[in-house]
Image (cartoon, rainbow, N blue to C red):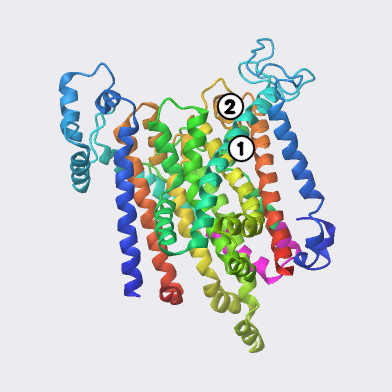
């Protein structure tokens, strides 16, 4: 699924030197999405809430590149503005998830002992709780809904997962000789955690972070599709798809374009995360 | 073995207890007096009194929990003030639909994933393997709610195939043909997501197993490829598959309902969403509790099956 080179030999043997063209195309696409989200109001886009009654359910045209929806709003503009919700939730939730899960996971794996067993037992109990049901339940009771609450709830729900990944990664590194060497030299715990352990688990953390963002964006999409995310008329990819349900027969574009935007975004995130993991695993073997 | 099962059982009880506390506390996340929120501001004093008695709202919170827990252990999840039916009976009519949907989707997913993974693993990096790996990776990035929307768009709207569109659901008892037709698209959608997971997990495990010496041994004895795959390689490679299946089936119970929502299939998920929309808090609380416990139970059962397939696990 990558470059032509892989055809010849086992990909693992040749891959380490390069990440492949597809990797950089994905990076470019994500960058485009993020820039679009940041500069949406500077870009020459129609107001996403402006209703053009002369073009209702119109197909793609020069005026409206991706057509208009059932209220005559420009689909392209709504997709670009809609990416703001997905990207904000994706990044915000992961900041919370990693902000809590990463230090706890590292500390537990480094200190071991009672702190570790207590934290791990606690996290495993929460891991057993189906996250999507917990998120939907809390969001349906904690009214009125807002973007902030969605980020907090999804972020907290991701903490046990982040904790587990980081703890496992740290355990492997903490047993290595250079950590013992640092301890023998009298380095403080804080120094070992930040200077020795953190750089070594960073590759795993980053690739997991990307896949985590993809998962969170999907979850926000599901919530929006069910009408539990930001309230209309604010566009988001999920609620555009949700709103298109009723006019699907007349205007298939309204379903297709937001779906495409969401899927491409997720595909790029997953691909980059997957690639990075293979890339760094190989380098680690070489160490 | 017994010790392993007992240890898992203790964990299970602990988790179910945490779930019960969590679900109980949901009502108290609501701003203001629960009775006002559940009944609305225009509630009659008689209804308020009934609710107060039902939830034990005038007692301290710890005691409320025990009142609530006692009711649940008697199978009483409360009576919805919106639909005026008991929550337990609503759940009893909705749950079988989810079970049917999950069973259908799992039959499809396993029927496709196991043979294809075996084919793929026989020649890693061969043409078929590369196509399937790339394809399954792409499918991994397409959320199920998009798959179902696109399927409905193509199959029931563009192609106009009857009984596949929104609100064409008929119960299994009244007409099983129409019932299967109306569940075809959602079952297929859930099957796609499951297939991707099962295929990827089984493929990589089979590739690893096929490098083992006992496979070389079986080959040198001249056993047929088919027999080697099914009798020798499949069982040791299926542990991760079973683990994935347990997590995935639990996930389908908890999150698979997204496909019900679009088509108006009255399973638990659809009932949950309509409950949220009509602020039917007791119903939402009941469904959250039942689904969470269900997911945990499914995981427990699969852990047990895994320990039967690979008894070494119990000795760790």
Relative to A87, residue A122 above or below:
below
Question: Which dot marks residue A244?
Answer: 2
Which residue is painted at 70% across and 49% down in the image? A272
Tell me where residue B137 appears, x and y as whole percent.
Answer: 66, 53
- Residue at the front extreme, as displayed: A186
Mark identifier at residue A175: none
User: A48 or B153: which is nearer to us?
Assistant: A48
Q: Is residue B58 left or right of residue B174?
A: left
Q: Is residue B33 above or below residue A193?
A: above
**Mark 1 neighbour density, 10 Å: few (under 14) some (14–19) many (20 or more):** some
Q: Which residues are magenta?
A: B107-132
Say if residue A37 shows up in the picture.
yes
Camera-nearest residue between A232 and B169: A232
Q: Is residue B131 magenta?
A: yes
- For the N terminus of chain A, the image quarter is bottom right
Disc 1 from disc 2: Cα separation: 11 Å
Which residue lies at the image location 79% right of the left edge and 44% below the top edge? A25
Magenta stretch: helix, strand or loop mostly? helix
When asked about the image quadrant of residue B63, the answer is top left
Whether residue B191 is visible here, answered yes or no, is no
Q: Quadrant of residue B306?
A: bottom left
Q: Position of residue B299 (x, y in %)?
A: 41, 58
The answer to whether B15 is drawn above or below residue B158 in the figure is: below
Label 2 SS: helix
Check disc 1 and report its element: helix, strand or loop.
Answer: helix
Q: Position of residue B286 (x, y in %)?
A: 31, 40
Residue annotated with mark 1:
B150
Which quadrant: the C terminus of chain A?
A: bottom right
Q: Are marks 1 and 2 on the same chain?
A: no
**Is A210 positioned to the left or the right of A144 in the image?**
right
């Amino acid at each position: 699924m990558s470059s032509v080179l892989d055809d010849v030999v086992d990909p693992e043997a040749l891959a380490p030197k390069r990440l492949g063209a597809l990797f950089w195309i994905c990076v470019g696409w994500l960058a485009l999405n993020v820039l679009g989200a940041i500069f949406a109001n500077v870009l020459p886009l129609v107001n996403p809430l402006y209703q053009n009654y002369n073009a209702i359910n119109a197909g793609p045209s020069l005026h409206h590149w991706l057509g208009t929806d059932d209220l005559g709003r420009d689909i392209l503009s709504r997709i670009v503005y809609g990416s703001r919700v997905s990207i904000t939730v994706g990044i915000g939730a992961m900041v919370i998830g990693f902000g809590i899960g990463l230090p706890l996971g590292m500390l537990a794996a480094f200190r071991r002992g009672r702190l570790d067993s207590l934290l791990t037992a606690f996290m495993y109990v929460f891991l057993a709780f189906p996250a999507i049901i917990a998120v939907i339940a809390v969001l349906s009771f904690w009214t009125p809904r807002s973007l902030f609450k969605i980020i907090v709830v999804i972020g907290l729900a991701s903490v046990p997962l982040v904790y587990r990944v980081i703890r496992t990664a740290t355990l492997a590194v903490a047993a290595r000789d250079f950590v013992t060497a640092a301890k023998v030299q009298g380095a403080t715990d804080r120094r070992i955690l930040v200077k020795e352990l953190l750089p070594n688990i960073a590759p795993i953390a980053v690739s997991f972070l990307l896949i985590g963002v993809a998962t969170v964006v999907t979850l926000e999409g599901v919530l929006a599709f069910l009408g539990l995310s930001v309230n209309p008329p604010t566009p988001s990819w999920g609620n555009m798809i949700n709103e298109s349900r009723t006019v699907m027969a007349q205007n298939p574009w309204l379903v297709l374009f937001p779906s495409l935007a969401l899927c491409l975004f997720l595909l790029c995130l997953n691909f980059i995360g997957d690639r990075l993991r293979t890339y760094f695993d190989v380098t680690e073997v070489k160490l | 073995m017994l010790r392993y099962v007992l240890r898992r059982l203790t964990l299970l009880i602990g988790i179910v207890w945490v779930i019960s506390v969590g679900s109980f506390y949901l009502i108290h996340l609501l701003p203001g007096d629960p009775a006002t929120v559940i009944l609305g501001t225009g509630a009659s004093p008689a209804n308020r009194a009934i609710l107060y008695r039902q939830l034990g709202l005038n007692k301290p919170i710890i005691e409320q929990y025990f009142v609530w827990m006692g009711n649940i252990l008697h199978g009483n999840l409360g009576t919805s003030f919106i639909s005026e039916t008991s929550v337990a009976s609503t759940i009893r009519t909705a749950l079988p639909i989810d079970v049917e949907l999950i069973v259908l989707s799992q039959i499809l997913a396993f029927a496709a994933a196991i043979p294809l993974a075996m084919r793929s693993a026989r020649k890693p990096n061969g043409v078929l393997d590369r196509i399937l790996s790339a394809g399954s990776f792409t499918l991994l990035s397409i959320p199920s709610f998009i798959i179902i929307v696109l399927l409905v768009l193509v199959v029931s709207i563009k192609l106009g195939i009857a009984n596949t569109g929104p609100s064409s659901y008929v119960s299994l008892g009244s007409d099983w043909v129409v019932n299967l037709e109306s569940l075809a698209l959602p079952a297929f959608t859930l099957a796609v997501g499951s297939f991707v997971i099962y295929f990827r997990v089984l493929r990589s495990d089979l590739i690893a197993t096929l490098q083992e010496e006992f496979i070389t041994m079986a080959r040198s004895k001249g056993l047929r490829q088919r027999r080697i795959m099914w009798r020798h390689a499949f069982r040791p490679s299926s542990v991760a598959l079973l683990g994935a299946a347990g997590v995935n089936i639990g996930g389908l119970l908890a999150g698979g309902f997204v496909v019900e929502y679009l088509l108006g299939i009255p399973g638990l998920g659809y009932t949950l969403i309509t409950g949220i929309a009509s602020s039917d808090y007791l119903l939402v609380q009941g469904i959250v509790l039942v689904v969470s416990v269900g997911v945990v139970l499914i995981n427990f059962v699969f852990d047990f099956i895994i320990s039967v397939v690979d008894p070494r696990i119990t000795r760790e």
